[in-house]
Image (spheres, rainbow, N blue to C red):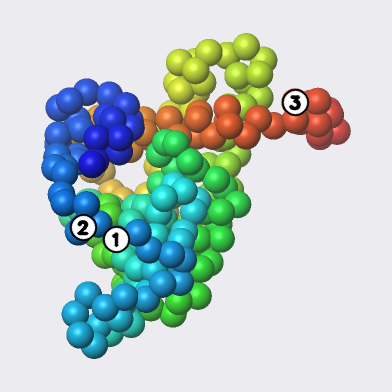
Amino acid sequence: EPEGLLRSARTVYRTPEAFAAQVGNMVPCPEGRVRAVADGEVFELLAGRPLKCHFMEGHARHHIVVHDPVTSSAFTGDAFGSTYDDAFEYGLALGTTVPATTPIDFDFRKAMEAADRVEAMGVAHAWPTHFGPISDVPGAAAQLRALLPKFEGVRHDLSVRMQRGATPVEAQAFGEERVEAIICDHFAARGLQSPPADFWTGRMRLEREINTQGLVVAAQRFPVDLAAATEARSKL
């Protein structure tokens, strides 16, 4: 029964139209067709086609990465970020990868571990949910390791601001500016050249919003030590 998952996803996309465009719909299926897998469990989808499941937190606590040794592939969901191959026509390098920090379970340390673990599989290809395959897995892992500390810095600053009285709405606005700047700098370094205005006001606006939402939630779940943060800043 997917309703619980759908209910959570709808809160991220805010409007039915945005949800329908990005996710579509899910319908229930017979319980007998659903299989819960353990970390490290191997099962065969077809004879001679073993698939190994790796429990992979960081983006979400329910995520698994499925390793297919026959094709040297890892099906990574959102645990290994999102790619933006549809912006190739604007000069963006294929395999450009950005962390997926959408609600509700972003955990910086575990997300960094996930990047290392997928790379350590030694696969030739990673297949994230969005929006294209990755053929340079070590390169994508390096991008994530460079970007995740920047996203974590936003989460830290959001926590400080909210503890000092900022509302979630104010925190969201502040966070979106920071997240957009991080993504813009990353895309520029990866060759993006003068995309049309609707690239930023449409597709990337949604990316900015939902990634920031996850950082706001994480800032509330993992509040920083305000006294320690204030003392550290005073020493700068």
Label 3–label 1 contact, CB within 8 A: no
As displayed, is residue 167 above or below residue 158?
A: above
Q: Nearer the viewer, residue 116 or 56?
A: 56
**Label 3 SS:** helix
Q: Along the horizontal axis of the image, is 213 left or right of 146?
A: left
Q: Which residue is mark 1?
A: 35
Q: Position of residue 175 (x, y in %)?
A: 49, 28
Alpha carbon distance from label 1 to label 2? 8 Å
As displayed, is residue 68 above or below residue 113?
A: below
Of the two numbered discs 3 and 2 on the same chain, state the one appearing first in sequence: 2
Residue 166 in sight: yes
Q: Which residue is mark 2?
A: 32
Mark 2 burial class by Cα count in 10 Å: few <14, some 14-19, many 20+? few
Which circle, 3 or 2, is nearer the viewer?
A: 2
Residue 136 in sight: no
Q: Position of residue 126 (x, y in %)?
A: 33, 68
Which circle, 1 or 2, is nearer the viewer?
A: 2
Q: Which residue is mark 3?
A: 226
Q: Nearer the viewer, residue 209 or 15?
A: 15
User: Which amino acid is tagged 1?
Assistant: Arg
Which circle, 3 or 1, is nearer the viewer?
A: 1
**Label 2 SS:** helix
Q: Give the residue drawn at x 60%, y 19%.
A: 162
